[in-house]
Image: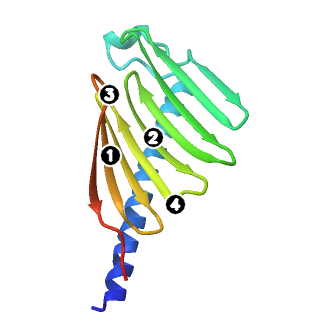
Amino acid sequence: MTEEQRIQRLEIRVLVLTVIACLTLASCVVMIVMSATTHAPPISKRLEAVDLRVGSTTLDGQTLHTKIPNAEAGQESEVMTSADDNAAFMVVGVGPVGAMASVDRGKPVVKLSATGAVRSIVEIDTDTGAWTLVRTKKSGPTHEQRTELIGPMTR
């Protein structure tokens, strides 16, 4: 196998993984929005107080934001998608835990992130094929750790 074929196979793998991550995030968004718009019978007695029809959806310019209150947990679930001339992103969250996919104009980097006690972001450089994991501790002093997952493509 030639070097060019190996490079091509790696580029295909990166593309497939990116598509899978985006589809997974999109399916989560669809499930949450569908749950918010249709009333399903309660899953358990604990959830009887939660009415999924109650919530707020706002469309502000090119940003769609849906919030669903959860009285049991004292939190709310939210889905937000936004696109303008400078960036596009999609966020799914329940209280302090969430996930986001984003692309900024003029930068060849796609970011997939998960937020909890530690915010983890996978940055995919579409020009070089490099993948970097950026982890940031949210409590206490800010501490960021960067780890190269896949190095840049060289010819």
* Label 2 CA crowd tier, 10 Å (few <14, some 14–19, many 20+): many
Percent across and percent down for residue 53 are 55, 18
Q: Secondary structure at mark 4?
A: loop
Residue sitting at x 43%, y 61% = 125
- Element class at badge 1: strand
Residue at which label 1 appears: 134
- Residue at image position (69%, 38%) is 62
Marks 1 and 3, Cα distance to the nearest angstrom? Answer: 13 Å
Residue 149 location in percent, x, y? 27, 59
Residue contact at pointers 1 and 3, CB within 8 angstroms: no
Residue type (three-letter) at the residue carrying disc 1? Val
User: Along the polypeptide, which appears first: circle 3 or circle 4?
Assistant: 4
Q: Earlier in the sequence, mark 2 or mark 4?
A: 2
Q: CA distance from mark 2 to mark 1?
A: 14 Å
Q: CA distance from mark 2 to mark 3?
A: 16 Å
For badge 2, the amino acid type reads Met
Q: For numbered disc 3, what is the local secondary structure?
A: loop
Mark whose residue sits in front, 2 or 1: 1
For the residue marked with disc 4, what is the amino acid? Answer: Pro
Q: Which residue is mark 4?
A: 108
The 10 Å Cα crowd at callout 3, few under 14, some 14 to 19, many 20 or more, is: some
Query: Residue 73 lies in what quarter of the image?
Result: top left
Measured along the vertical axis of the image, is residue 22 above or below residue 69?
A: below
Residue to which mark 3 is pinned: 138
Query: What mark, if any, has residue 100 been given in the picture?
Result: 2
Quadrant where the N terminus sits is: bottom left
Q: Secondary structure at mark 2?
A: strand
